[in-house]
Amino acid sequence: MSEHYFSKTPSSPERPGLLMCRLRGHDFEFVTSSGVFSHRRIDRGTRLLVESMVLPEEGGLLDLGCGYGPVGIVAAKLRPGLRVLMTDVNERAVDLARANARRNGVADVEVRVGDLYEPVGDEVFGAIVSNPPISAGLHRVVEPLVVGAVGHLADGGTLQLVVQSRKGGRALASLVERHLGGCEVVARGGGYRVLMGRMG
């Protein structure tokens, strides 16, 4: 069976790389490696999520399945008063995200290793953002992500997910609507859409 970026401990040799990019009007540098999602470039879905995500001014934001950290790090750069928690099941990704938070000079960022909400405990957030691994299984991974958000969003908090429009887009929108009482499309582009549900 081939290895996936959502493996806990990637067995592929580390092949480090450096991405330089401009997101939301700021320049960023991200150290990447083989064995993590989209290590050669910022993929189109992540870029659309970053460029369109709606960020609270304060409180907490959870970047779930953070990879090497672009979504959470951009959020922390844009909202210095925001407490950003990033999590990933992939230990290599977590190490890279920690290094990238330091490299990009963002404060009040914490990165934890673990599956879905397991590393979060009973914490609640003003926003949960994710580029979920649809290929890991809509019902096995993505549905628990949506269901679990209900217990980890503050009143008025948002769940924001990017998905390929023709690869699970309609099914994911239905899940968000069912569990959060509504779902809106906040951005479209490049075959992707960003979905948002709001708590309360």
Image (tube, grey):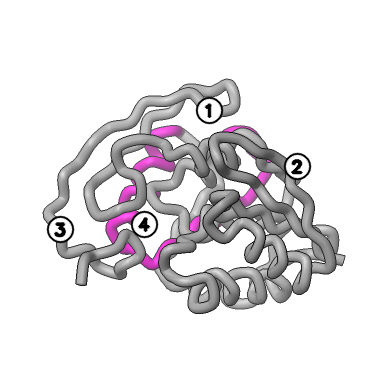
Q: Which residues are magenta?
A: 77-104
Label 1 crowd bin: few (<14), some (14–19), many (20+), radius 10 Å = some
What amino acid is at disc 4?
Val
Q: Which residue is mark 2?
A: 57
What amino acid is at disc 3?
Ser
Q: Which residue is mark 1?
A: 23
Residue 109 image position (x, y, % from top left): 52, 49
What amino acid is at disc 2?
Glu
Q: Which residue is mark 4?
A: 94
Residue 5 image position (x, y, % from top left): 32, 59
Label 4 crowd bin: few (<14), some (14–19), many (20+), radius 10 Å = many
Q: Are marks 4 and 1 in contact (CB under 8 Å)?
A: no
State the residue in front, 143 or 53. Answer: 143
Asked if residue 187 shows in the view, the reply is yes
Quadrant into which the N terminus falls: bottom left
Residue at 35% from the left image edge and 51% from the top image edge? 37
Q: Are marks 4 and 2 in contact (CB under 8 Å)?
A: no
Q: Earlier in the sequence, mark 4 or mark 2?
A: 2
